[in-house]
Amino acid sequence: MKIKSILITLLAPMENHIANGGEKLLGNASSIKRRPDGKVYISGQMQRHVLFAAIDRLNQDDSEKGNTFISNGDGISNAIETDIRADLGGFMHPSVGDYSGRRTAPLSVTPAIALIESEVGRDLMVRLSTMDKNNAIATREFSQGDMMHMNFSLDLETVGISKVFKYEDNFSIGKIYIKHISDDERKRRTRLFIEATRMMNDYANQARNAVSGEPQQVLIIFDTKMSRKASRYFVASDIEKKNILAELKERNAAYFLGDDTQEGISVAKAYTEALAFLAANTLFNPCKDDAKIQTFAEAFPQK
């Protein structure tokens, strides 16, 4: 099978958490992010941060990492061949001023959202001061417990590859693809992406509270098309769930469903089977078979 895209949708329980703090509302020391319907959420930006933190740890432990690394979020390079964040997460360098200064990320995420309205509590905090008798009193919000729904998608068309549009007289006349890494490295980075979605732990202000976003239920899809329809699987009715899976089968997509709360395939087994499937199949590659591998600097020399 030629895998064109990967979608991972999951449910993760979180308790007594402020996994993504917002503004300091109403005098609070920290306020939790909430939608108008009362459901707490974790922003897409935070989800990307947590995912890349997990990829970083996995890459460090990988004997095949070579000279690859994950750059810090505030200093992303354009060296796709070595910087995995630049490759999977994209970048925007306005100072460059041309096409080589930006890259659309093949990786995308949704905010993590609680399935039902959240019960938010407040911890009383007293800020003691030896200089002022009027000590500041504030509260810190937390959510009592949520089942968080989150999604991750990877477009294999541009993992380790640049897509460049060709223009003539200001009209687009097509596109070309430039390969920056080997096929083995493309598959390795894809494996890191999949593994990282089960190791989500680096949420804001939670170093001591050990909040985990590791899945309790997961659906991993290797698709023959670019589709994110199944991202609503865990919030769909039983009929819609059945139809979503039937549609995947119809176009020969492969999926792995794991649930730690039921007898049968656990989350760990679903990931094990998914990684074995990845190893046995090929990633979609829009480049020609004899395409030369070029570094980003070679492909886009600075003027």
Image (cartoon, rainbow, N blue to C red):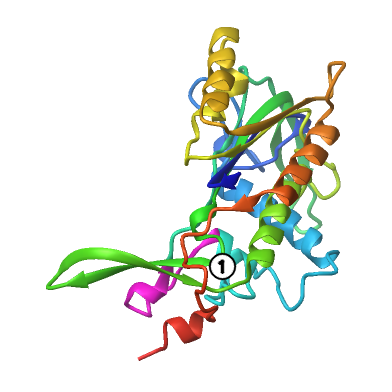
Does 91 lie within the magenta span? yes
Please determine whether, in this image, residue 3 is positioned above or below residue 192: above
Residue at 63%, 72% in the rendered image: 83
Give percent across and percent down for residue 248. 55, 27
Judge whether residue 11 can be spotted in this image. no
Residue at 51%, 74% in the rendered image: 290
**Residue picked out by circle 1:** 86
Give percent across and percent down for residue 284. 54, 53
Residue at 56%, 42% in the rendered image: 43
Q: Which of the two residues, 139 or 298, is positioned nearer the viewer here?
A: 298
Judge whether residue 66 can be spotted in this image. yes
Along the horizontal axis of the image, is 48 left or right of 259?
left
Residues in magenta? 89-102
Q: Amino acid at mark 1?
A: Ala
Quadrant of the frame with the N terminus: top right
Q: Quadrant of residue 66?
A: bottom right
Give percent across and percent down for residue 89. 55, 59
